[in-house]
Amino acid sequence: MRHFKSALLLTAALSLSACGEKAKLPFSAGTGPHPTLPAPNKTLIPTVNVAKAVHWKAGEKPTPAAGLAVAAFAENLDHPRWLLVLPNGDVLVAETNAPPKPDDSRGVTGFIEQTIMKTAGAESGPSPNRITLLRDTNGDGVADQRKVFISGLNSPFGMTLSGDTLYVADTDAVLRFPYHDGETSISEKGEKVVNLPAGRINHHWTKNVIANADGSKLYVTIGSNSNAGENGLAAENGRADIWEVDPKAGAHRVFAFGLRNPVGLGWRNGVLWTAVNERDEIGSDLVPDYMTSVKDGAFYGWPWSYYGPHVDDRVKPQRPDMMAKAIAPDYALGAHTASLGLTFSNGAKLGDDYADGVFIGQHGSWNRDPRSGYKVIFVAFSGAQPKGEPKDLLTGFLNDRGEARGRPVGVAVDKTGALLVADDVGNKVWRVTKAK
């Protein structure tokens, strides 16, 4: 009987792909410094338009922008999500997946959500819980050495190197490891720097970490425990924040808050920037994901409002006092794009068009019709701020049937100036170069 009910629920979940509303605005309306924000379009059944994961066939690869080329840097990985390029040119990749979170997405709705995630290849299978080192010994743009660098982690994600210390953000703690240039593995057990919110819900489980210039502070992203507060605000304690951590003392403070799911982090001229996934289920045109400079002490709205004081009336009780404090982000990246990876173009050698700006890895939508994301984009900067429209840099992750051959996550500029892209559904790391 239990299997029969599961089959019925599975049928219901898959049939949802035909339900919901459609975008009324062009995708470009939800991008740039001043996106169009229409009225919410709530429906009884939310739009479900997930791209089924089918992976890359032999010989297939993404499509680069004109003047660029792409090839596989590493293949046959296991959910590669995040990247760190070491000073000697070695590349660390976090092979990771969601930890057990038994109280997240429970009941019929939860079963449907989990089915969607598995169909999308986003959270299928146990986490490898390791960081792998990739080395290109002959300079041909392909990693010919692969070593398990650190194993036995707990859904690791973010990594940052400060001096001779490597910091790794597990789902429940930031750990530190001694690092020596050129080594291919670390056997020492990580030393805990600070505990991070996790637990039995742990809805947004990916945690990222970056160090400031002198290594005196770490900045850690912690996503919310829900879409829009539906698990109760008590479950959000310490979440939807960016923490500032003293790595010596382990003490932390909230640096910025009201960020539903901040993931990518990067420095530009001493200013911290982040890429943020905004909320779902109020229409295909809402809410744009965004990137923003992160101001010390600033509140960005979640859960009570979005893009400044735009109210989300699903959240009870309302907090007009908090909505009045909410500031708008700097630049919209399109509704439901799942913008995760962020790296500035410092050191990139992809041509003048990509000399000054930021690369963004967009994992792709499930709550928008038509689909959005599933690509890597570039946003140019002018002075301190982004300008103009996003430029597609790497596309083709969806095939002609709308199935996901891959889904980009982390992005990083390697020592030669090429752009590396972690593809967690394709199980590859792609390398984008200037065409010869």
Image: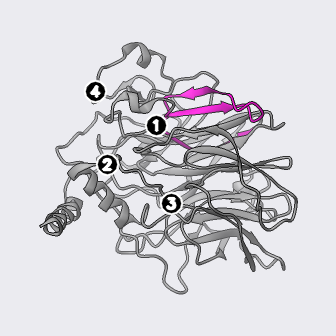
Name the residue beneath numbered marker 4.
313
| Lower position in the chain sequence, tag 3 or tag 4 | 3
| Image quarter of residue 100 | bottom left
Name the residue beneath numbered marker 2.
105
Mark nearer the viewer, 2 or 1: 2
Q: Nearer the viewer, residue 380 or 148?
A: 148
Question: What secondary structure do most residues of the magenta stretch adopt?
Answer: strand
Q: Are marks 2 and 4 in contact (CB under 8 Å)?
A: no
In space, the residues marked 2 and 3 are separated at their CA atoms by 17 Å
Q: Is 314 positioned to the left or the right of 197 in the image?
A: left
* 419 up-or-down from 311: above or below: below
Name the residue beneath numbered marker 3.
97
Give the crowd class for mark 1: few <14, some 14-19, many >=20 residues within 10 Å. many
Q: Give the magenta part as a residue range.
A: 239-268
Q: Are marks 4 and 1 in contact (CB under 8 Å)?
A: no
Q: Are marks 1 and 3 in contact (CB under 8 Å)?
A: no
Q: Residue at x 79, y 79 (%)?
A: 140
Q: Residue at x 41, y 12 (%)?
A: 321
* 130 up-or-down from 270: above or below: below
Residue 16 disc label: none
| Lower position in the chain sequence, tag 1 or tag 3 | 3
In space, the residues marked 4 and 1 are separated at their CA atoms by 16 Å
| Lower position in the chain sequence, tag 2 or tag 3 | 3
Residue 203 is inside the magenta segment: no
In space, the residues marked 1 and 3 are separated at their CA atoms by 20 Å
- As shown in the figure, which amino acid type bears the numbered disc 3? Asn
Q: Secondary structure at mark 1?
A: loop
Q: Secondary structure at mark 2?
A: loop
Residue 260 disc label: 1
- As shown in the figure, which amino acid type bears the numbered disc 2? Ser
Q: Is 182 positioned to the left or the right of 316 in the image?
A: right
Give the crowd class for mark 3: few <14, some 14-19, many >=20 residues within 10 Å. many
